[in-house]
Amino acid sequence: MPKQSPSPNWQDMALGTAITEPGSAKYQRTGDWRSSGPVWDLDKCIKCGVCAVFCPEGCITMRADGYPEADMEYCKGCAICVCECWAACIAMVEEKE
Amino acid sequence: MEKLNVFASRLLPTEDFVCSGHRACQGCAEVLAMRMVHKELGRNTIAASATGCMEIITSPYPESAWRIPWIHVAFENPASVISGVEAGYKALMRKGRYPKRRINFVGYGGDGATADIGLQFVSGAMERGHDMIYVCYDNEAYMNTGIQRSSATPFGASTTTSPAGKVSIGQQTWKKNVPEIMAAHNIPYVATASPSYPFDLHRKVRKAADVEGPAYLHIYSACPTGWRMRPELAVQIGRLAVETGVFPLYEVEDGKYTITEPVSEFRALRDYLKPQGRFRHLTDDVIDDIEARLRAEYRLLEAKVRMTHEEEV
Amino acid sequence: MAERKGMEVSIAIAEAASVCDVDCIAAYPITPQTHVVEHLSEIVADGDLDAEFIPVESEHAAMSCCCGCAAAGARTFTATASQGLALMHEILFIAANLRLPMVMVVANRSLSGPISIWNDHSDVMTERDVGWVQVFAENGQEAVDLVIMGHRMSEDKRILLPLMVNFDGFILSHMVEPIEMPTREEVKKFLPDFEPQQRLDIDNPITMGPVGMPVVYTEAKMAAEWAVRDAYEPMVEIMGEFEKEFGRKYKPVETYRTDDAEILLIMMGGISETAMTWVDKVRDEGVKVGLVRFRMWRPLPVDDFKKAIAGAKVLGVLDRHFSPGGPGGPMAQEIKYMLYGQDHAPKIVETVVGLGGRDVNFTDFDQIFDRCKTVLGGAPVPPFELIQVRGGHYGKA
């Protein structure tokens, strides 16, 4: 589970209010924003990787076996992947609480 | 070129320097463009950001989406800031106080930070010849503050400060042509790009990084929130922008113009305007006027291509 | 020890930046700062200083550029005045919050309008809240020494703040004075190469200048407060080291013939040169008067000031700026802050003089002194007064 950095006392803030941990936005689970999310039909997937290229979140990676995989911790449900998929193998599915 | 091979997308670099967990809106093509730029530039890059969407969505303390060194000073000045960083490292490397290394220096801002409040700063940095890249992520209004018009807002678009009303069609001025202003600085490289054309974009970022001296990239960045458009269309709309002649993709290398995604037969402008709420109020005659002007601008661009390549003969 | 040579103070300041071996200079020309950056660009053009001279298109860009240079870990210098400083205003706060060491020389000049290129302190006094270390020079030698000490202070790991050296436009910037200029080798012993605490480093990427949500902004401001406050001790220590190295003694607050003085004139900057001569004159007439001058202005040297004025009955404060419709001059207000509620606090007579290049001469000091004398004699403290104004401040001719 990603951890949230605590709000520091002023004495504990980095010099110049700098953020010293690169990529610490990973602690933000932006997947919480989503009401529906993409579901792949891998039987139809042609492994082209277009979904990964156009995902604004950068949460789709190509697995070793060539198929895409989305990290739903971050997917905001924009559906660009659905719209761009060459094989039309992605569907948006509403997610219940 | 974009359509040659669907599998070519697997050849693009994948290491991300703007990580997941950034707080951009659903379907933000601006952050998509920015991530592409930094995938191409790679690890040895220092970025200076303007105040704006791409600043606030990546840096609310104490969490940063950045995996490269990044600085934000103010709204109007990323070009100046990064020119200072470039000069600083140049001096330190020359004086032997920092190892000689190839570093990409990138300043970026939105269209407000570039075309309006920061125009002087971008012009100054380009004119001084720093070895840097300036990127304008153009979403055609002040989106971060709530969709107010900028000088890069297209004619007819309804924004919160150029609202369409009973006696107004919305934005009443034509989009300021910043790439042309930058080309007039006679810098080695100017290009327009769009994340909807990732290969073209990656190639242009590479060129911008490889030239000695200043380079300017003007990147079309669809904003579903500000354009009142369905988020899943953010990439598609970028293709429509090119296919309708709204946002031609071209580059200017040492003064020579090349259209990198030529359009032989334009799609109807309505196809581009229709999905966007900001243009919903436009009447047919206004659309026809806009289309006529876009065609004229494209012809001018083609003329520049011919003229600048004639010299070679 | 170097010999003293007559040189224009602006030229000397440029030479001082050069012996500090600065790496980057980003500056935009503005009267009366121009001679500083002109000479620096000459030094760079002649190859006598290996630095990047960045001829920016505005002061706002100059300060923005300096932020970039300092964030790269380069020793950074700039100079400005008046409207230029005002144009930098926005970025001054940010440079301080980012904790970027740099030295900026300000040739103090009045702010428009009406436009005036001449000297007063309205430019710097409107920048008191920016979070910079701020010092004032009285003469050319002091300006030179403050530039050298300034880099050392600014880069000290306990300070790490931008530092502003103020010197009066024209009345100091364009004077030819005898200056002892240390060599680069001598300075290097006192001021080693800048090793930044943190920088924009591709091997250790950090995010500088992030968004301060309400949950952290207050803490960031507290950090800024203590950054400037805590600069005091190391600054005093560095002044001591400078004395050891170069033989010239500096302290946060300067006094002149204050022993047994009942009336003290309080000021900063170049007019104290004239004031000292005036003090000598009236002392010769048997009047117990002295002079106190702020060298350090941020952090405000409260204890040094209280010590400097101990025993005085009336303080005649000479401000070179005031807030229209407000409480008068800034220095007087801050002195009131330092003394309010204190037992046996001296009475404070506020005078504003020398605006927009109007000379401050013996007649003015006599008039200020007369205002103080009536208070010393038991008269009520008068409201602040802009003397030298035709028509009178309160309608009195």
Image (tube, coloured by chain):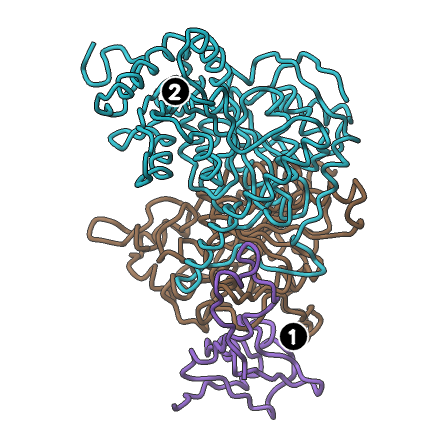
What residue is shown at x 60% (from left), y 20% (from top)?
C140
Residue C115, numbered label: 2
Q: Which mark is residue B308?
A: none
Judged left or right of residue A93, residue B19 is right
Q: What letter labels the chain drawn in cyan?
A: C
Q: Chain of mark 2?
A: C
Q: Secondary structure at mark 2?
A: loop
Q: Residue at x 23, y 23 (%)?
A: C382
Could you say which is closer to the camera, residue B279 or residue C181?
C181
- Look at the picture and state if C79 lies above or below B287: above
Q: Tell me the quarter of the image containing the C terminus of chain C.
A: top left
Which chain comes out brown in the rendered image?
Answer: B
Kind of residue indicated by mark 2 = Ile
Q: Colour of chain A?
A: purple
Q: Residue shown at 72%/47% (left/top)?
A: B211
Q: Residues within 10 Å of mark 2 (few under 14, many from 20)?
A: few
Tell me the residue that label 1 is attached to: B6
Q: Is residue C361 above or below residue C335?
A: above
Which residue is rendered at x = 40% and y = 34% of the image? C126
Identity, as a three-letter code, of the amino acid under mark 1: Val
The image shows residue B299 at horizontal and vertical percentages of 53, 45
